[in-house]
Image: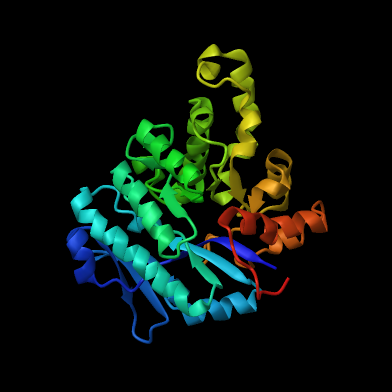
Amino acid sequence: MKIDMHSHFFPRITQAEAAALDPVRGPWLRVDEGGKSGQIMRADQPFRPVYDALWDVDTRLAEMDAQKVDIQVTCSTPIMFGYEYPIERVMPWVQRMNELAIEFCEPTKGRVIALAQVPLQDIDAACREASRAMSIGHHGVQIGNHMGDRDLDDEGLVTFLQHCANENIPILVHPWDMMGGDRMKQWMLPWLVSMPAETQLGILSLILSGAFERIPESLKICFGHGGGSFAFLLGRVENAWKHRDIVRKDCPKPPSEYVKRFFVDSAVFDPRALRLLAEVMGTDRIMLGSDYPFPLGEQQIGQLVADHPDLTEADKKAIWADNAIDFFNIDVKGFAA
């Protein structure tokens, strides 16, 4: 069995619907004539070229069949988060997106399942919406790795993580609104440099702040894109913890002790990187994730795992499906083994 736990969708939101959120920057989908390609738009400005697997469930199912993907976990494209807006304006948007996600998945009979989005700018509302989303069929939530200048160790965000831990709501953390500003002006540098750094920042904010000590171990939290630069730089962090008291002042255990508190996906695109990731995290903490259907995702879903010479069949089975089944509480009855 193959379960891809990191994919995205974007419903056919009109410009008028997006304008209710923000007439200047509201995200919507412009579909080209013929219905096979389009653009994610921000008001009148193109943001990203896309194709119909992002919004057409029949295309998605056909491509899943071609790639032998049994189940896919999907979530909103991060431009849809709406974290910058007042709660009274964003709440109807968030709830509408979560309902559209369920509508998108419904015809697939369990082959595509959804993660909700929540209004992290209001923690009480985010907790309520996470619980409501689970009650209507979502399998967890996707959140950004920060809220403005507030990282995951922020008291409010820790409260949200505690809520999810207590209610068995799985979380996928996705980088967004990347650091770097004008220095990341071309060559997709925000995606190639800032995005891995944002993910590492999210992980380290939970470790070094001591937040993991305040969050129940029942929390299911996964960081996309292989955890960003975390695995490669863990040695640097560990060395700093040993030799600088300002690094360990809030973190009672060596940083490497906390790898058992979170998961990562397998979207690292290089066998050497996957080898290191498996050594650092353990194959029981890695789930297959492709970032489908975007060009920076794994184009042959699961091939990196399938071809890896150092992974046993048990390792591959865990990464391909078993870890995700447990993490997202997926019912696989009726699916091929």
Q: Quadrant of the N terminus?
A: bottom right
Q: Quadrant of residue 68?
A: bottom right
> Is 98 on the left-hand or right-hand side of 219?
left
Q: Quadrant of the C terminus?
A: bottom right
Please say if 162 is above or below 246: below
Q: Position of residue 47 (x, y in %)?
A: 33, 62
Please say if 76 is above or below 273: below
Q: Position of residue 203 (x, y in %)?
A: 52, 37
Furthest residue toward bottom: 34
At 53% across and 77% down in the image, what residue appears?
109
Q: Name the one closer to the observer, 68 or 167.
A: 167
> Is 273 on the left-hand or right-hand side of 210?
right
At 64% across and 38% down in the image, what residue appears?
260
At 66% across and 54% down in the image, what residue appears?
323
Q: Name the one closer to the observer, 190 or 337.
A: 337
> Is 72 on the left-hand or right-hand side of 285?
left
Q: Report the label total.
A: 0
